[in-house]
Image (cartoon, helix red, strand yellow):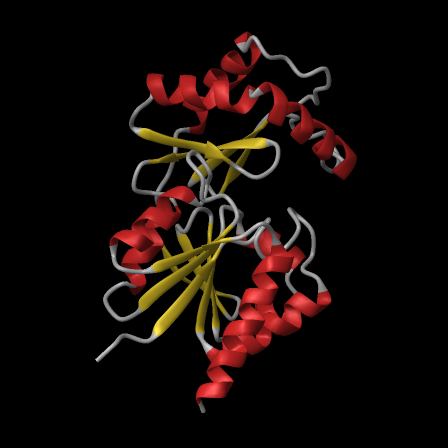
């Protein structure tokens, strides 16, 4: 007898525009999708970001699991159900990251005064633009950096050097303007173990490529016999979800 399916999905860039509230049609599609299939969101962000991005009908939906902080903390219907209590030595990495950014031969012409944030002590999200004291870099700043980094490869240089110096950690592209740092075994891929015995796992992600922050979980899904959708953004994810919902209706 075949296993039922569970659909896991990245959030920023896959379900939503990065750090933006989910759009209306996508929210409606996700409600129907969660009524049709077992569904879980796996994100590098803390739960407070989900509160800002998701409307109540999604945030408090008992049919949606939220694996936050690189999959280290599970929430459902607003309640914390699991916490791996994995930690990372922030004091160790803050000066390392500041130093490597300072010594990178590829220097961006803009910067902000602070260059790191912590996701519930499970991961470090080190931003190339940093965080201003109030608010975040504008979407225009982000887009300008993305275009520059795509051409120059600043984050690739930083990640390649960090991987060589600290092989016990995973370093990945963390969204548009950052690098994510987690201990090996403490990233999104760990969520697969929670579902793989009971379900056939399907994963949606926009950064499945090498060094992308969906890469490790995508490999883990495939290794346990699951399947993946590599998507270009929320619009494509929504259309796939709508097609899968319709196919399920056609079966009944």
From the top left corner, tell me how far across and down residue 233 is, in percent.
Answer: 61, 52
Q: Quadrant of residue 11?
A: bottom right
From the top left corner, tell me how far across and down residue 1 is, in percent.
Answer: 21, 80
From this viewpoint, is residue 51 visible?
Answer: no
**Residue appearing at x 70%, y 33% in the figure:** 142
Q: Which quadrant is home to the C terminus?
A: bottom left
Q: Quadrant of residue 30?
A: bottom right
From this viewpoint, is residue 178 visible?
Answer: yes
Q: Quadrant of residue 130?
A: top right
- Please give left or right for residue 67 compared with residue 140 in the image: left
- Please give left or right for residue 69 compared with residue 26 in the image: left
Closest to the observer, 184 or 24: 24
Closest to the observer, 115 or 210: 210
In the current view of this chain or complex, which residue is farthest to the bottom? 252
Q: In the displayed structure, would residue 119 be above or below residue 107?
A: below
**Residue appearing at x 31%, y 64% in the figure:** 195
Closest to the observer, 177 or 58: 177
**Residue appearing at x 50%, y 43% in the figure:** 207
From the top left corner, tell me how far across and down residue 243 is, in percent.
Answer: 55, 73
Q: In the displayed structure, would residue 252 be above or below residue 77?
A: below
Q: In the displayed structure, would residue 141 be above or below residue 41?
A: above
**Residue appearing at x 49%, y 18% in the figure:** 157
Closest to the observer, 74 or 180: 180
Please state the total of marks drawn on the protein image: 0
From the top left corner, tell me how far across and down residue 242 is, in percent.
Answer: 58, 72
- Please give left or right for residue 88 compared with residue 98 in the image: left
């Amino acid at each position: 007898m075949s296993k039922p399916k569970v659909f896991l999905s990245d959030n920023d860039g896959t379900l939503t525009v990065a750090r933006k509230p989910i759009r209306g049609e996508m929210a409606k599609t996700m409600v129907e999708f969660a009524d049709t299939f077992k569904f879980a969101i796996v994100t590098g962000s803390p739960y407070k970001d989900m509160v800002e991005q998701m409307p109540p009908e999604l945030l408090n939906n008992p049919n949606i699991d939220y694996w936050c902080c690189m999959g280290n903390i599970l929430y459902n219907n607003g309640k914390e159900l699991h916490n791996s209590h994995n930690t990372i030595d922030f004091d160790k990495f803050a000066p390392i990251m500041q130093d490597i950014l300072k010594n990178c031969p590829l220097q961006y012409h803009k910067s902000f005064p602070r260059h790191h944030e912590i996701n519930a002590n499970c991961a470090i999200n080190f931003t190339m633009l940093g965080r201003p004291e109030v608010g975040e870099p504008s979407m225009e700043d982000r887009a300008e950096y993305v275009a520059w980094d795509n051409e120059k490869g600043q984050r690739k240089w930083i990640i390649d050097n960090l991987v060589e110096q600290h092989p016990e950690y995973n370093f990945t592209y963390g969204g548009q303007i950052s690098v994510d740092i987690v201990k090996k075994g403490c990233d999104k891929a760990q969520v697969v173990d929670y579902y793989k015995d009971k379900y056939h796992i399907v994963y949606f992600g926009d950064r499945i490529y090498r060094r992308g922050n969906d890469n490790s979980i995508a490999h883990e899904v495939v290794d346990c016999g699951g399947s993946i959708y590599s998507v270009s953004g929320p619009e494509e994810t929504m259309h796939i979800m709508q097609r899968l919902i319709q196919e399920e209706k056609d079966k009944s």
